[in-house]
Image: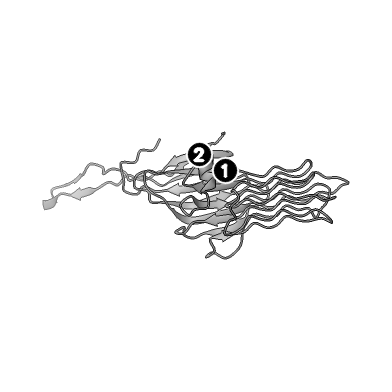
Amino acid sequence: MDARAQLTTRCGKAALAAMVALGGIGFGVMGAMPASAAPTTITISGVGETPFVVPAGVTALLNVAAVGVGGANGTPLGGAAGAGGAGAQVSATSVPVTPGSTIYLEVGLGGGAPGAGGGAGGGASAVSTCSLALPACQAAFYTTSQPLLVAGGGGGGGAGSTTATGGAAGQGATPATTCYAGIMGGATSSGVGGAGGACPPAAVAPAGGPATGLGSGGGGAGYNGGLGGTTGTHTAGGGGGSSFVATGVAGAAFAPAAAGTAPSVTFTYDPGADLSVTKT
């Protein structure tokens, strides 16, 4: 997959120790002490999966932010179409990790397929302890040891009706909450909107469900993926995916991603005084 990592390092300052010689006969400067490792910020912005080995001395990822993908709009028929649902932006001040372990940065993955003319569901962005490329990981994604933070994707809009809107990904204003369910997709006179991803999740999958009728939107991906819209004689929107943070994550916040915001995962790590860490 095409995953690009942009690495930004803030320069640290070498600490110099100065000593004034005793007896008032002059002063000398001691050799410069080793520079402490500086905090490093990483942004993954390419859709796909990127593994990251946690450096020695790092026990938490700081200022983490993940942005899920908004659902695509439906195709206008007769001048009308349902808008895609908003993706989520989930942030945290600290996410605990284990030095030497591998975490997986998932960006924009798993949006549900639409029916012909409908909009695709948006992919989720996540920090996970296992690779979502592995079927075993997808099956175990709901255990607390797997996902650390998930920003759900929005549901896709349906074709031909302004009420066939995609459901938004899980988001809200209660910081103590660890999971927000996705919103159900918009219905029409006979089309049924897809259900949003649940909290706690149903035994489905983190991927969004496909639409089951022509012109309906696909479900958004998430901690639990939303379902695609179903069709009677009219189309319907897909449900949004749910958003989640694991127990132990500090300072979590769930918000809608601004329209047009590209999916990404960003975090900072600080090895502190561990000078064995080598950055390239």
> How crowded is the residue under tag 1: few (<14 C-alpha within 10 Å), some, or many (20+)?
many
Q: Residue at x 71, y 46 (%)?
A: 218
Asked if residue 255 shows in the view, the reply is yes
Q: Which sits earlier in the primary sequence, circle 2 or circle 1? A: 2
Specify whether 143 is left or right of 225: left
Residue 72 versus residue 214: which sits nearer the camera?
Answer: 214
Q: Between residues 25 and 12, which one lies in front from this camera angle?
A: 12
Do labels 2 and 1 touch, CB within 8 Å?
A: yes
Q: Quadrant of residue 171?
A: bottom right
**The N terminus, quarter of image:** top right
Q: Is residue 167 left or right of residue 191?
A: left
Q: Quadrant of the C terminus?
A: top left
Mark 1 lies on a secondary structure that is strand
The residue at 85%/45% (across/down) is 77
Pick the residue in front: 76 or 205.
205
Which label is found at residue 107? 1
Q: What residue is shown with label 2? A: 50
The answer to whether 159 appears left or right of 20 in the picture is right
Q: Residue at x 71, y 53 (%)?
A: 194
Q: Residues within 10 Å of mark 2 (few under 14, many from 20)?
A: some
